[in-house]
Amino acid sequence: MNNHYPFELEPLPYAYDALEPHLSSEIVQIHYENHHQNYVNSLNQALSRYPHYQNWYLEKLVAHYNALPVQIRTAVQNNAGGVYNHNLYWSSMCPCSNYFPIGTLKKAIDRYYGSFAFFQKQFKSNAMDVFGSGWVWLVADTSANLDIVVTANQDSPLSSRLTPIINLDMWEHSYYLQYHSTRSEYIDNWWHLVDWTYAEERYQSARVLK
Ligand SMILES: [Fe+2]
């Protein structure tokens, strides 16, 4: 699997119906095959005539799109972001029903938010406040401090030197077919899907970067 041009769609780590009933098979398939694939295609198209940047790996494109030629800067910002954000979105969910944080991340959430329940409340409040299309993230900074951040469109906290731990897609395409305008229910049910083992691995890697 290339982590540079030409980029490929990462394999989905489970079957389309694996996240039922919380996320329908129809949504997962359309979201993955159409939306996610389109970001991959558009990123490749943007880089196709710029060989100097074809060896840049995905995270570098997302974090440093401002260093690219102005002709492709916005396209890479949107589409490298779209690829990266969706890679993380799929990877940070699972049909594994492990409902609570574990390990060092659990300790950090308790330390920063007092309890997992209060963290969930804060995260949901941020998600509900996303205006238009965007994402809500749990991130760690370079000192392994936790924060909840919101980004617009396909922007990513990687561009702000933050390590994404998990993210929630708040674009309508991620929930509308199943939840219509009830964002609140989409968010509540997403908690059933979070892969806290994967989140712990990501938080530990952020701590190593410290
Ligand atoms: Fe999406």
Image: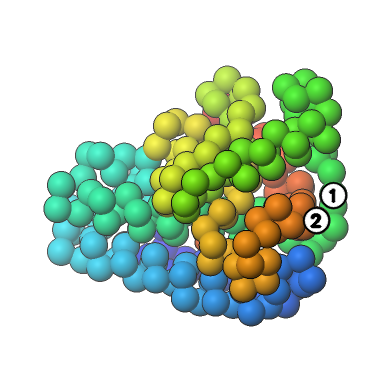
User: Which residue is found at the position 32% from the left and 49% from the top?
Assistant: 77
User: Percent position (x, y) of residue 14?
Assistant: 69, 71
User: Percent position (x, y) of residue 22?
Assistant: 76, 66
204 displayed left or right of 98: left
Q: Quadrant of residue 54?
A: bottom left
Q: Does the rendering let one see residue 203?
A: yes
The answer to whether the residue bearing label 2 lies less than 8 angstroms from the nearest atom of ligand 1 is no
How many numbered dots are placed on residues in this image?
2
User: CB atoms at circles 2 and 1 under 8 Å apart?
Assistant: yes
Q: What's the amino acid at mark 1?
A: Tyr
Label 2: how many Cα within 10 Å (few below 14, some 14–19, many 20+): some
User: Which residue is found at the position 77% from the left and 72% from the top?
Assistant: 20
Give whichever of 128, 20 is nearer the camera. 128
Where does label 1 land, which residue?
99
User: Percent position (x, y) of residue 49?
Assistant: 15, 64
Q: Quadrant of residue 40?
A: bottom left
Q: Identify the secondary structure beneath mark 2.
A: loop
In the image, is residue 89 above or below residue 165?
below
In the image, is residue 7 above or below residue 125?
below
Q: Identify the secondary structure beneath mark 1.
A: loop
Q: Does the rendering let one see residue 93?
A: no
35 displayed left or right of 46: right
Where does label 2 land, which residue?
192
Residue lying farthest to the front in this orientation: 181
Give whichever of 169, 131 is nearer the camera. 131
